[in-house]
Amino acid sequence: MLLAADKVRLEFPRAKGGTVVALDDVTFSVEPNEFTVIVGPSGCGKSSLLYLIGGLHEPTAGSIALSGKPVRGPGPDRGMVFQSFTLFPWLTVRENIAFGLRQKSLPQPEISAIVERYIRDVGLTEFADAHPKQLSGGMKQRVALARAMANDPEMLLMDEPFGSLDSQTRMVMQELLLTIWEQQHKTVLFVTHDIDEAILLGDRVIVMTARPGRIKSDIPISLPRPRNPDIVLSQGFLAIKRAILDLLHEEVIRSLALPG
Amino acid sequence: MRLLRPLEPIQRQPALVAGCLIGGTILLAWALATYGGMVRTDFLPEPHKVITAILTYGSDGRLLEAIWVSSRVVLLGFLLSALLSIPIGLFMGSFRLVQAGLEPTINFIRYLPVTSMVPLLILWLGIGIEQKIAVIFIGTFFQQVIMVTDVVARTPKDLVYASYTLGTGRFSAVFRVLLPYALPGICDAMRITMGWAWTYLVVAELVAANSGLGYMSLQAMRGFRVDIIFMAILVIGFLGMISDMSFRLVRRRLLSWAE
């Protein structure tokens, strides 16, 4: 067991006083080399959960442990790809990818070798010396992925990384992520609200409830690998999608306070 | 008309023409008013008088001397201010605790008119270079601190978070992320406050000085030499323009990565 979240609870103070419970009693674990996807209606706290695991926020109660050690803050053992573009704009693509490696004070030839490999893997050789402002949204997220992977974290946290991309670009990014993941089976925890994306990528899909976010269901995805995007049309895929859609539909109705 | 659509860019040529047209009109109006005898020339000098003044004062070294004296004071006061305001603003923008501690005091001082402190500064420091540097420092430092603080505090939090997940510590993120991200904004803040530094220089030199462009202007008033006052104003304007252009050049060259 690589990651264990135990009865995690997160409260926010409300501006007018009182508190909002964002997450309640969230318990789950992630095995090494597993690709876990969390889906849930918007506002269910799935991104907050990822920030807690990243050590960027602190839970109100409960505990999170990585390889048995409690998470007390952020660290390079948990790499993260954010939904917003977080490349360092003053650094080139190459320098962005090297950012974490430089701080590990690895020898320069070793840094270069790793950086060049990931630039190739994400197909940005021609843009290696470009600054982020010269890149499209999809390219920026490819660099962000390369930057996180190059640092070789124990676990990769991905917070709707393709959420702000157009649907064609998103498909290409999913394919790229699948290809890279097949090579090294890095442990990934991936948050999304896109059900197709969740089933296409994940070994399992955790479905969360509307606020306060709890775990509603934990569904293994036994579709064969390596997968390619055509799989979304297969019978097996559609059956899983129907099941997850039903689960989520209840929650969306509940979160919008509509008569069910 | 293509030239008058909101927010639409225009070409270089009409931009130049528009700029020259306005500038030319002002010069023309000046020439008409003076040569046409519409105003008394002891109050508004004819253009050629000002040019003559620039040529005489420029050739006998008096103008260069005044420019040197004034520029030195502006640069010293400005650099001293920037040297302190950038690190202090960086820490105020980075850490809410530092901001909470310093901001009330700085905001209080920031709204005191600098001119109200000039008598005190003359008492304390005399009328030499120290007094003038102090006036410029007080006039720019507190504004700079607040501007730098704002720029740094606007850094997206996820950018800092991203650096944490790559192994950057909380303190080193200030120098590895917040400072570089804020540099273009800091450069802009410096460019804007440089203009204010020139304003306060003239204030200081008008009140108490024995050399410099402001002093030259004050002397000219006593001798009823409007041409020299105009010369001083024009020179200060040009110096301001040059410093503004240098800041823009530095920003374009060194900080071209900024959006």
Image: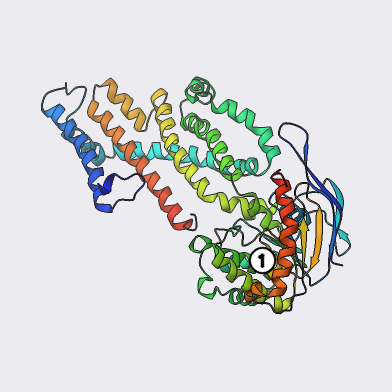
Residue at screen point 71% across, 38% down? B97
Quick check: A202 above or below B206? below
Q: Position of residue B117 (x, y in %)?
A: 51, 22
Q: Position of residue B165 (x, y in %)?
A: 71, 59
Q: Position of residue A81 (x, y in %)?
A: 67, 61
Residue at screen point 38% across, 25% down? B206
Looking at this rendering, what residue extends furthest in the front direction? A260
Q: How many marks?
A: 1
Q: Nearer the viewer, residue B85 or B187?
A: B187
- Is A51 situated left or right of B204 in this image? right
Residue at screen point 63% across, 32% down? B103
Q: Nearer the viewer, residue B32 or B1?
A: B1
Location of residue A137 by image quarter: bottom right
Q: Which residue is mark 1?
A: A196
Q: Name the chain letter of the residue that bears numbered label 1.
A: A
Residue at screen point 75% across, 72% down? A186
- Residue B170 visible to the viewer: no
Looking at this rendering, what residue extends furthest in the left direction? B36
Quick check: A160 above or below A105? above
Q: Position of residue A79 (x, y in %)?
A: 72, 63
Location of residue A200 by image quarter: bottom right
Residue neighbourhood size for the residue with mark 1, other residues' Cα within 10 Å, grouped as few (<14), some (14–19), many (≥20): some
User: Which quarter of the image is occupied by the N terminus of chain A?
Assistant: bottom right
Which color scheme is applied?
A: rainbow
Q: Nearer the viewer, residue A189 or B93?
A: A189
- Residue A122 visible to the viewer: yes
Dot 1 lies on which element?
Answer: helix
Amino acid at the residue labelled 1: Asp
Quick check: A51 above or below B200? below
Quick check: B52 above or below B39? below
